[in-house]
Amino acid sequence: MNARQYRSATAGGTDPILLQWRVLLVAINEELIDVRRLMAETSVAELNRLAEEYFSRLPDWSYHLAKPFGSIDETAQLLINFAVVLQGLSLCPGMTVLEFGAGTCWASRYLTQLGCKVIATDISPTALKIGRELYERQPVFGEKHEPQFLLFDGERFRLPDACVDRIICLDAFHHVPNPERVLSEMARVLVEGGIAGFAEPGPEHSHSPQSQYEMKAFKVIENDVVIEDIWQQAQSAGFTDIKLAIFNVPTFHLGLDDFNDFLAGGTELQRWAEATRAFLQNQRNFFLYRGEEVISDSRFRAGLVGEIKIAPETLSAREGEPVIAQATITNTSKSLWLPRSAGLGAVQLGCHVYDDNGKLLHHSYHWEALTPGEGRPVLPGQTVSPKIHIPALPKGSYIFEFDLVSNDVCWFALNGSPQIRVRANVS
């Protein structure tokens, strides 16, 4: 290798291991493939054809059907990336989620199991065929939404405007030759307040040995993910904010003394910070936000709290008759409480029944709507005063424990919201 080749190999990089690989590649192959030139020289149609050619020539689908458990070496990275993006998307059941570059749809299947309405899109018909096979071989549990499989032509989603709540993209965006166009389409189909979450490599990705191999052997795009460029393109597309995730793979393992030192803010904390910084040199998990943030509602557990008052302090009723009480409920959270008619996330006042000694007799004995009829949402800071009709109980003395509950989401007490206990006598 001459001096010019060495300078070319080491330009623009800071990671010592990465630099060694780049120097080695130059020495063997004279020069690295320039991914930007490859993108300029290859049409979208040609890249679509190459992707389909790869999947259609697979002699065995076992590895792809097994993902993310197809390879021990990659499973942890795939699952951690998925978890980081999943957490940042702030999902809830019933949301419409588009998986961009779904491939053989392993992540789509997980999202379907979570109760989302999934649209799995990819440029390869065979990849989506493998995805259908995955759903057939490993059907989701329970009554969930049927997935939609959507072939992408590389230019436009065959979807109407503002029709998806979230977009997830796992190691697919760095393969696209037209990132500006794809970001524009993502912004078009996202609703106001929608989020697109990505797990991608970093700004030196195209120079890695594997990327160079993939581009040489298959002409696949292995683009560098320069987040400043993406953010500029995203703003032009209509996105209004960006956030990046800080995390580390592999996890940091410490002995007990070092762990306590870490918690105390000692030298181990600095070591962890350095390890995380080194990892993030070539990893970019990020989120793009479209429009103003929509007020959270009771389909999401985070922050659900309220205040309950019950009158009178001691309740009474005749045997065979309901126990009637007057409740005063204040929404002290920042979330909109959905009415009973909403189904998922509907907030009601629940009641557990204990005997006079505090032994639980009936958990979730009765739920009462907070507003009459089909109900109205309860706004943050709003107070409502529903009358409670607790079904008849046998003669005896009881303790009623009242707690707010969001249907199929959580009891508010799990968030630290205070419960109220009152005594009741049935004579």
Image (cartoon, rainbow, N blue to C red):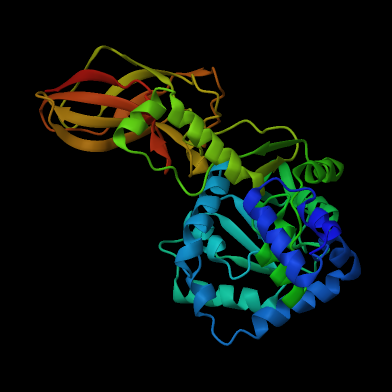
Q: Residue drawn at (49%, 36%), measured in percent from left and top?
A: 272
Q: Residue drawn at (53%, 40%), measured in percent from left and top?
A: 275
Q: Residue furthest front?
A: 2
**Percent from the top left, x then y, of residue 159?**
76, 60
Q: Residue furthest right?
A: 41
Q: Quadrant of residue 39?
A: bottom right
Of 243 and 263, which appears nearest the observer?
Answer: 263
Of 393 and 13, which appears nearest the observer?
Answer: 13
**Percent from the top left, x then y, of residue 151?**
72, 71
Q: Residue drawn at (9%, 24%), measured in percent from left and top?
A: 357
Quadrant of the snapshot with the N terminus = bottom right
**Percent from the top left, x then y, of residue 94?**
55, 50
In-image side of 335 versus 281 (left or right): left
**Percent from the top left, x then y, of residue 100?**
68, 60
Of 345 and 150, which appears nearest the observer?
Answer: 150
Q: Relative to 35, say whether 268 is above or below.
A: above
In-image side of 91 versus 8 (left or right): left
Q: Relative to 316, say whether 163 is above or below.
A: below
Can residue 234 be seen from the camera position used here? Answer: yes
Q: Quadrant of residue 395?
A: top left
